[in-house]
Image (cartoon, rainbow, N blue to C red):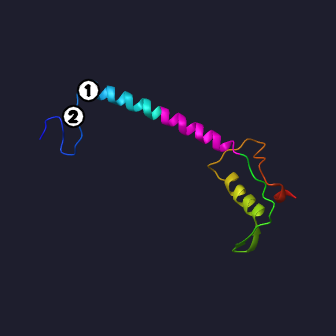
Amino acid sequence: MDTNTMDHGRKMVSNEEWITARKAFLAKEKAFTRQRDELSRERQELPWVKVEENYLFDVPNGKETLAMSWVRHHDRYENSPLVKLDSAGCGCVPEEAVS
């Protein structure tokens, strides 16, 4: 067995060589993070499609529209102790839900 290789195949190096390799890896990792952040930003900027069909879903208490389902889930999120909203709350309720 090579004295620079352990049983699992990883190369054994000096501390200086490890630091050089680690810095090279961190540079790649930072570039990947920036790319992922940019991709996420682009996804958030995608246009939306207005849902004009009145979808109905079977729920335990009967039928529910897409808008009402959204409001119910939004309320559950908004009232969660894990979520802290400003005093104005969130203004992203579908028009069908408030009319």
Q: Position of residue 20 (x, y in %)?
A: 33, 26
Inspect the magenta stretch and tell me whether residue 57 lies in it: no
- Splitting the image into 4 quarters, where does residue 18 fall? top left
- Splitting the image into 4 quarters, where does residue 14 fall? top left
Near-viewer residue (72 or 17) = 17
Q: Which residue is mark 2?
A: 12
Q: Residue at x 24, y 40 (%)?
A: 10
**Residue type at numbered disc 2:** Met
Pointers 1 and 2 in contact (CB under 8 A)?
no
Up/down of 77 relative to 46, above or below: below
Q: Nearer the viewer, mark 1 or mark 2?
A: 2
**Residue type at numbered disc 1:** Asn
Near-viewer residue (9 or 14) = 9
Q: Residue at x 73, y 74 (%)?
A: 61
Which disc, if any, is residue 15? 1
Residue segment shown in magenta: 31-46
